[in-house]
Amino acid sequence: MRRDIFQAIADPTRRAIIALIAIQAMTPNAIAENFNSSRQAISKHLKILSECQLIKPTNKGREIYYQLEVTRLKEIDQWIAQYRKLWETRFNQLDNLLNNQNQKS
Amino acid sequence: MRRDIFQAIADPTRRAIIALIAIQAMTPNAIAENFNSSRQAISKHLKILSECQLIKPTNKGREIYYQLEVTRLKEIDQWIAQYRKLWETRFNQLDNLLNNQNQKS
DNA sequence: TATATATGAAACCATTTGGTTGCAAATATA
DNA sequence: TATATTTGCAACCAAATGGTTTCATATATA
């Protein structure tokens, strides 16, 4: 099981779950009502999101509220950051230039 | 085949390929030298990256140079942006508050 | 021209993924 | 207490994924 945050956000259903509970914490049942697949399928997604700490459960009687741990998304942000300066400073044009020169491994 | 950009960057080998050719465009062989898996395995990754236009091939004789289309990563950046303001403005604390109140679907 | 090199495509395979159904445990409610 | 509700876990399954080996094609080079 790889179970890193990049793999966690790769699934569109999981991204939709993230978007849902970003507004407010929700129970598995309430989350599942927003999708066509079964509650158990959603629970599996919640498990994956929990395992990489993108969401955090809070027990309340027999219900469990899942809430977004938004700071975990900083990891993605940091990965993107190293490329952001490339598209901001037009270094990609430098790449075009390099592409027209002789190269060897 | 889902083949969207989130799925493309989910694989650690593909992220390593992106990091490699961000410096300069490279041929499949040159890229494969940096990994333990076969050239064909790398070629499959390049195909996936090409299909969602994260990289762009340029023919040069019998060689093909793959170059990063860095602007495609903006799509990830835009997805992250909607959550960035959450961790910047401490709205996640508001989530904690909501979690302690009664909720219904 | 004959040979070597660079690449992509196809066939195959083991593992992972995302889904299902069924069940058990814990908590609420009649 | 008996029943209903909420949830997680296990078993199972089809499809996707990431890898391999083999082969065909195109371009350099001897």
Image (tube, coloured by chain):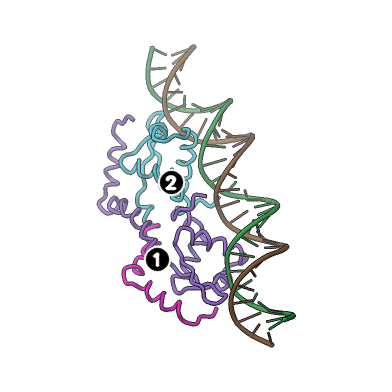
Chain colours: A cyan, B purple, C green, D brown
Residue at coordinates 44% horizontally, 55% vertically from top-left? B5
Instruction: Depth check: give the residue in front, B47 or A67.
Output: B47
Could you tell me residue A70's position as x and y percent? 35, 49
Q: Is the residue A41 above or below the residue A91 in the image?
A: above
In the picture of the structure, the residue carrying the numbered disc 1 is: B70
Could you tell me residue A28's position as x and y percent? 42, 34
Quadrant housing the C terminus of chain B: top left
What are the residue bounds of the magenta stretch? A76-105
Tell which subunit mark 2 falls on: A
SS label for mark 2:
helix
Q: Are marks 1 and 2 on the same chain?
A: no
SS label for mark 1:
helix
Residue at coordinates 45% horizontally, 44% vertically from top-left? A50
Left or right placement of residue C29 versus residue D1 in this view: left
Instruction: Depth check: give the residue in front, B62 or A75.
Output: B62
State the mark number for residue A12: 2
Could you tell me residue D11's position as x and y percent? 63, 34
Q: Is the residue A5 above or below the residue B44 in the image?
A: above
Could you tell me residue B75's position as x and y percent? 37, 57
